[in-house]
Each structure stands twice: as structure tokens, then as C-alpha cells.
Amino acid sequence: MSNTSGANGKRPHATMKHVAALAGVGIKTVSRVINQEPNVAPETAARVWDAVHALDYHVDMQAGSLRRTGGRTQTLGLLVSSVDNPFASAMHRSIEDAALARGVAVFASSLDDDPEREDLAIRAFLRRRVDGLILTTASRNQPYLASTAARGIPVVFVDREPAPGAVDAVMSDNRAGAAEATAHLVRHGHRRIALLTDRAGIQTATDRRRGFLDALSLAGIPVAEADIVTELHDAESAHAAMAQLLARDEPPTAVFSAQNLVTVGVLHALRAAGRAHRTALVGFDDLPLADLVEPGVTVVAQDPHEIGRLASARVFARLEGDAGEAQRIFVPTRLVPRGSGELPPA
């Protein structure tokens, strides 16, 4: 199979026939391997999968008769951190609303901050010949971008920007929001402030840690590495980490929790230790019912609806012919005081 581009400058799609030729088997064998049917020798299946990966072949889940005029399928692929995360679900709804207004369906999948899951989801989207992709990423590198570019499929990243300048990206101003949250605690008299955050390899966690350190540096407060806890991926791990901090002889007087699920875990730990009214807390990203607990949870609120709106606008602009340079769009955050972040040092 030739790798040269066609008349429109895009690389032609590999077909099952090309895979069969490269693997040295028949088309029916390729079909059986891809559909995971039995009675195929392991070495034969291995050759077929090697050919699939070498040719970047994607099974077309759409019958040819279902493709719209101009080669469009009227679908988008959306990859979010987790569909049960309130931030991700709000962003999903905003994108879905914009797409439905144009008669476009949205296929959504959860990332779970797993690079392997990310790769599988992208392959599934491409098999369905989606017209565009809106993605949250867990990977430091995105090898699939070469494939999407060759196929003319626009990609917009949301929440995280993996490759500055390479593709469009819409995200919160995480560093500035984290700095504002930390400075708020400093203004209320705190000098021993703990940071509990997500996995260090995730861009949002990195940016929020930088903002936390920016504010401490500006206030002349030395960093206590023991008060920075990373690699927290859910409420349970955050609960355990916060409990350990509170058990120290000199526990922190304030906490900046840099992710909404982490904030949930911190809240449970504070209540279990009887410290909910003694340890100040500011969380990054709002929570359902955060204003109904006592004290109310002070947060740095993101705007997932606006992020979704801007991301869908970018992908549709690309589909309509916008060939301009990639855009980096930062959506401002806002501090919402509710009580927990205004507690003075005990």
C-alpha cells in the first residue's frame, strides 16, 4: 500500500484488503481476527494485528450508505475525565446542546486518566468515522494526532493542553485560580497550608501546584514539602491523606484541595476528626450542595458550560473551513467564599 497523499492532500484510508495483503492472509481471516472469532492461529492473529497497527487501519463501523453528503457522519467524539464527574458532565451537556442544534450526535467516553483507555477510545471514535474530536487527555504525547490530521479530522482539547500550539485547546486558567485560592487563605492569616492534588503527571494538577507555590512565594511563606500530597485520584485516597495530615503534632491550619473529588475526601476527613470548623478549606472546582453543608465550602469555580461552548464552536469552525493557527483559550475562574475558606487559624 502506498503512503502517498491523494489529490486532496490527505493520506488515503487503509482497507481490509491492504491489511490482508500485508499480513499474507485472506480478507475473511482479517475479518475473523478483528471480530475476535475463534479458530484463528495465534501467530496468524498476531500478523494481522501487526498489519492493522502498521497501516493505522480503523474498522468502519458506519455503512457507506449512512455517510452524509460530503463524507460527513454528523457525529463528534468526546473524551472526558469521567462522565460521573460533575465538571465533565456539565461540559458534556454544553457540547451536546451545541451539537444537537446542528443535527450532530455526540459519542462520549470516560478517560479515567488512563493513557491506554485514551488510545482505545480514540480508536473507537475513528472506527466510527466521527467528523471531529473534543478530547481530555491523560497522555504526555498524542501519537494519534498525526492520524487525525492526515484524515482531516479536527481536534480540540479541553481542560488540559498537551501540546502547546499544535491544536486548539480550551481550558480554565488553572494556575491563576490556584494562586487566588492560596492567597485567599494567606489573607485570612494562614501560614501552614497543605496542598492535596491529583496525579502529578496530569497537566491541571501541575498548573494548580504551580499556582499554589506562586502564592506562597509572593507571601514569603516557605514551602513545607511534607504538606504537599499528590497522586490522589479519588475521594477515598484524599480522605486517607488528609487524615494523616491531621494526625500530626502540628497539622496544617488550612488546606487547598486542587480537584473536586479530592475536596470531597478532605471534607469527610475534617468531619471525622471534628476539624470542619477549625481547619480552613478552599477547593478547586465547585461541588453539588457545597453551599448547604456547614460551613459552606469555599471554592474556585470553573465554568464547564463555557468551556464546552467554546470547544464546540472551535471544532465546528474547523469543520466549516477555518484553517487558521491553533488557538489557546483560557476561561477565567472565580473565587466563591462560603465560609470554609474564611476560617482563621485555630
Image: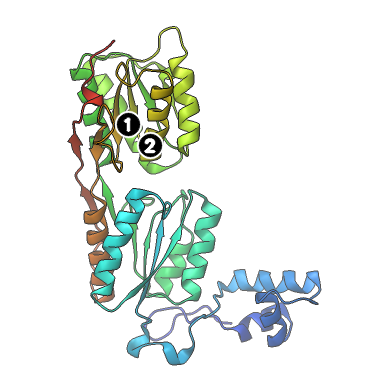
Is label 1 in contact with label 2 (beta carbons under 8 Å)? yes
Q: Quick check: can you spot residue 62?
A: yes
Q: Is residue 207 above or below residue 156?
A: above
Amino acid type indicated by mark 1: Arg
Rendered location of residue 184, percent (x, y): 20, 24
Q: Quadrant of the N terminus?
A: bottom right
Residue pictured at 21% horizontal, 42% vertical? 333
Q: Quadrant of the C terminus?
A: top left
Q: Quick check: can you spot residue 160?
A: no
Q: Is residue 29 above or below residue 249?
A: below
Name the residue at the bottom extreme: 65
Q: How many marks?
A: 2
Quadrant of the rendered image containing residue 325:
bottom left
Q: Tell me: 99 left or right of 28.
A: left
Quadrant of the rendered image containing residue 224:
top left
Amino acid type indicated by mark 2: Thr
**Spatial distance from mark 1 to mark 2, Cα to Cα?**
6 Å
Q: Which residue is mark 1?
A: 210
Q: How is the image coloured?
A: rainbow
Q: Is residue 267 above or below residue 174?
A: above
Q: Residues within 10 Å of mark 2 (few under 14, many from 20)?
A: some
Residue at disc 2, secondary structure: helix
Q: Which residue is mark 2?
A: 206
Rendered location of residue 20, percent (x, y): 68, 83
